[in-house]
Image (spheres, grey):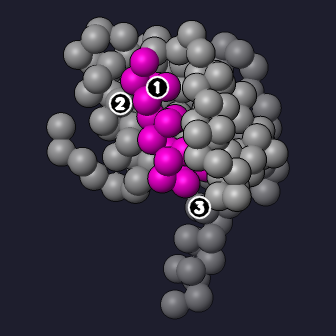
Amino acid sequence: MALTGSAARRYAEALMDIATEEKAVEEYRSSLDAVAAAFSDEFLRVLADPSSPLERRLKAGEAATKGQPAAVGSLVSMLVERGRLGLIGAIAAAYGDLADERAGIAKARITTAVPLPESQRATFVGRLEKSTGKRIQAEFEVEPELIGGATVQVGDHLIDASLRAKLDALREQLQR
């Protein structure tokens, strides 16, 4: 796989290659999420402190990844050595995005003017899945300023079908 994007994304892509080879994509995802959650800001500061001997910082990283896949432990050790352990949360997020992408799952943010009942949410998601050809993992938000309708963001694609947008467009036309 060609490496692209940020440092976190490149680390995630490398780990994805290993996980795919080992047929353990979801195991690695769980492991990365657990490791990232375990590293508090204070712990990250301690492991990044160059005044602390490297051997000691490496042992702390090893202890934190005990029981995790070897590649995840190696990643943490490498990040400690390079002073980049602060990337672990971003790496876990990038890895999750890659895993979803490979599984055909797209994330969507659906914003409506009023809360939707569960049945309407399911219908909304069903229509999105049909139009995108992907499984949709939806996050719903309420923004009363929309007045009515909805905005839907799937990846970098935004559909603004809100009443506010329609009124703004009408206002623009009338001002010409």
**Amino acid identity at mark 3:** Lys
Nearer to the camera, 161 or 81: 81
Disc with the residue nearer the chain's start (1 vs 2): 2
Q: Start and end of the magenta stretch?
A: 70-87
Residue drawn 56% across and 80% down? 172
Choose mark 1 or mark 2, whichever is in front.
1
Q: Report how far apart the C-alphas of labels 1 and 2 lie in the structure.
A: 8 Å
Which residue is drawn at the image coordinates 36% and 10% (left, top)? 24
Mark nearest the camera among 2 and 3 is 2
Contact between marks 1 and 2 (CB within 8 A): the answer is: yes
Which kind of residue does numbered mark 2 sit on?
Leu
Q: Is residue 125 magenta?
A: no
Q: Which label was assigned to residue 72?
A: 1
Dot 2: few (<14), some (14–19), or many (≥20) neighbours within 10 Å? many
Outermost residue on the bottom side: it is: 176
Q: Earlier in the sequence, mark 2 or mark 3?
A: 2
